[in-house]
Amino acid sequence: MLEVCGECSGWQEAAVTLRQKEVDVVILDWSLPDGGAVDLIRAARTDLPGLRFVILTAREEPEVARAAAEVGAHGFVLKRSGSDALCAALDAALAGKTYFCANSAPLLASALREPSNQPLARLSPREIEILRLIASGRSPKEAAATLGTSPKTVHNQIASLRTKLDIHETAGLVRFALRHRIISAD
């Protein structure tokens, strides 16, 4: 039997809650208001190595499936897959196995077929998250506060993004983020 131990509004709140409660598995939305699922998983891996993560997302993009696999998520379920898929992912995670729902299999296959010279494949999950924040209109200082890092670190990562993508102005980064569906035009 599963028991809900809590609900959090963002990854920083979740990081605190996870240290305070005994939790076996976390159901985590890919896009959190204050950062990405990747950041929470990476932070928890150090302090709570036995914790398992199941990602629940509406984002049907190969790079999201790839990043989930690379960060070591135990489950990846698209929201349209329904509760049976989520239950199967939880069961697999609790058994120490990995589960990607049937609807996400084509995404993962596509991500694995993409050559590494694809622009998104050259970016780390953290760089993608910074790109999302900057392209959404956040300043480097605001992005740093959201991610719990220094503005200098964010500036360095933006410089790395610009070099890797060969895009040297913010408007170009926004166009790239829109084209690759890192942000939406809404």
Image (tube, rainbow, N blue to C red):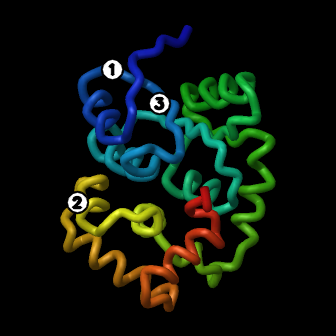
- What residue sits right under mark 2 in the picture? 149
Residue 111 lies, in percent from the top left, at: 70, 64
Q: In this picture, is 123 found above or below 63? A: below
**What is the secondary structure assignment of the residue under circle 2?**
loop
Calculate the distance from the C-alpha at mark 3 to the C-alpha at mark 2: 24 Å
> Total of numbered circles in the picture?
3
- What residue sits right under mark 3 in the picture? 26
Residue 106 lies, in percent from the top left, at: 80, 54
Please give the name of the residue rendered at 76% of the width and 34% of the height, measured from the top-left corner. Answer: 81
Which quadrant is home to the N terminus?
Answer: top right
- Look at label 2 and name its amino acid: Thr
Q: Is residue 2 left or right of residue 181?
A: left
Q: Quick one: 15 or 185, which is closer to the camera? A: 185
- Look at label 1 and name its amino acid: Glu
Q: Toward which corner of the image does residue 63 lie, by quadrant? A: bottom right
- What residue sits right under mark 1 in the picture? 22
